Amino acid sequence: MRDAFENIPAGPMDWLPTGSFLITATHDKRSSGVIIENAILCCPDPRIILVAMPSGRHVEPLMRDNRHFGLIPVPEDERLLPRAFPDDGESHEDKFLTIPCRVGPGGTMIPSRCESWVECEIIRHIDLEVGHRLWVGRVIACGEPAPPPKRRSIKAKSN
């Protein structure tokens, strides 16, 4: 059945939103993360996020066991995160040991350099049996960029 869909051109679907995201998980003092390309807000109230990820990534057992994941948008000009978290399939080293992080309410690691992030509680996991898994999470916490500091006017001192 899979062969029937392999010849569908990607062009007509270019309007669908894509981007780079770092997905993170922590369980039992182990942390992991990987860059993914597919995440979407699929329900506004309550806020539900759907993430598609190739099967077999090292972050999946931690997501499954902790029932939480962090999701951080990766800007196109970001250089550190893609190098620190390559999609190399299998990795057993904790890459968060060298990156300053804060811990989200569900225990996931959020790199301190990332101002925008969400943390989700996993409510569903779907194995599509086509090389990808879907993870559905309810947003339990988020962070956004701080507004620019207000400029104070400087009054000249009178003599």
Image (cartoon, rainbow, N blue to C red):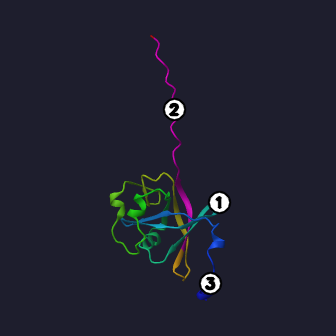
Q: Position of residue 100 (x, y in %)?
A: 37, 54
Q: Position of residue 58 (x, y in %)?
A: 41, 73
N-term-proximal mark, 1 vs 2: 1
In-image side of 53 versus 100 (left or right): right
Q: Quadrant of the C terminus?
A: top left
Highlighted range, magenta? 134-158
- Alpha carbons under labels 2 and 3: distance apart: 57 Å
Q: Secondary structure at mark 3?
A: helix
Characterize the magenta stretch by its predominant secondary structure.
Answer: loop
Q: Which mark identifies residue 74?
A: none
N-term-proximal mark, 3 vs 1: 3
| Kind of residue indicated by mark 1 | Pro
Q: Secondary structure at mark 2?
A: loop
Residue 3, by quadrant, is bottom right
Q: Which mark identifies residue 44?
A: 1
Residue 49, by quadrant, is bottom right
| Kind of residue indicated by mark 2 | Arg
**Residue drawn 46% across the image and 69% down it:** 63
Q: Nearer the viewer, residue 3 or 56?
A: 3
- Residue 66, compared with residue 157, is above or below; it is below
**Residue drawn 45% across the image and 77% down it:** 56
Q: Nearer the viewer, mark 1 or mark 2?
A: 2
Q: Which mark identifies residue 5?
A: 3
Q: Which mark identifies residue 151?
A: 2
